[in-house]
Amino acid sequence: SAVISQKPSRDICQRGTSLTIQCQVDSQVTMMFWYRQQPGQSLTLIATANQGSEATYESGFVIDKFPISRPNLTFSTLTVSNMSPEDSSIYLCSVAGTGATETQYFGPGTRLLVL
Amino acid sequence: RKEVEQDPGPFNVPEGATVAFNCTYSNSASQSFFWYRQDCRKEPKLLMSVYSSGNEDGRFTAQLNRASQYISLLIRDSKLSDSATYLCAVFTGFQKLVFGTGTRLLVSP
């Protein structure tokens, strides 16, 4: 499976500010995804990051709040905009396997605390 | 009804015990199923994929029951290191994985 890294690994931010999370993969992948895992909860898909086009957002998530970039096949960013304490969560990127594309592998996550 | 449901546990078992978790799903058209393991403060790691009736890997066996729309994970000869949260995930199409809330397993000496 691909090696996935995320930066930052954790951050503490003030409400009203924005944070951009980076996801880097060591090989080209077609599908990249962004998830949120709130404390004690499971993973919720935020959006699919599409290379060369706008991200596809799931119900309840909008581009103004979570803008996503995907400039190439190895990199993506997720921005959490105008943060509030409710945005405190772990944000994870994942990539689909090159063979079985329904299999996903996760980055180490970014732990965000908003004060 | 949630798309994917799991018993949150925790399941407390002694070392060497056999333990099984179930995961139910609502979309009868789902074709691919997965078990992930998540340790505290870590990312989910793929444990097993289940595409047909089942899959076995060492002490771990995953089974699929399409008629009743559930998958199960059986762990034999539990080790202390098996303590973790086990997440069930269902591929619903449109390149979308839906996760259950996870089942927490605690293996004690």
Image (spheres, helix red, strand yellow):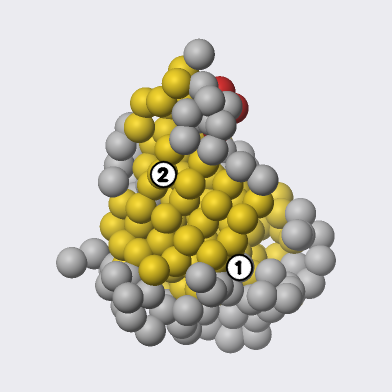
Query: Which residue lies at the image location 38% right of the left edge and 47% below the top edge?
Result: B21
Between A7 and B1, the one nearer to me in the picture: B1
Give amino acid for label 2. Answer: Ala
Mark 2 burial class by Cα count in 10 Å: few <14, some 14-19, many 20+: few
How much space separates mark 1 and mark 2, taking CA atoms? 23 Å
Answer above or below: position of A11 versus A73.
Answer: above
Residue occupying the far right of the picture: A27
Tell me if I can see residue B18 in this picture. yes
Q: Are marks 1 and 2 on the same chain?
A: no
Query: In the picture, which quadrant includes the N terminus of chain B?
Result: bottom left
Left-right relation of A4 to A50: right
Name the secondary structure under disc 1: loop
Report the residue marked by disc 2.
Answer: B20
Chain ID at mark 2: B
Name the secondary structure under disc 2: strand
> Which of the two marks, 1 or 2, is nearer to us in this view?
2
Left-right relation of A13 to B80: left
Callout 1 touching callout 2 (CB < 8 Å): no
Answer above or below: position of A82 versus A111.
Answer: below
Report the residue marked by disc 1.
Answer: A103
Mark 1 burial class by Cα count in 10 Å: few <14, some 14-19, many 20+: many
Chain ID at mark 1: A
- Residue A111: image x %, image y %? 50, 39
Can you tell which mark lies on residue B96? none
User: Can you tell which quarter of the image residue A22 is in?
Assistant: bottom right
- Residue A68: image x %, image y %? 53, 69
Residue occupying the far top of the picture: B109
Query: Which residue lies at the image location 51% right of the left edge and 41% below the top edge?
Result: B75
Give amino acid for label 1. Answer: Thr
Between B100 and A59, the one nearer to me in the picture: B100
- Residue B76: image x %, image y %? 54, 38
Tell me if I can see residue A83 in this picture. no
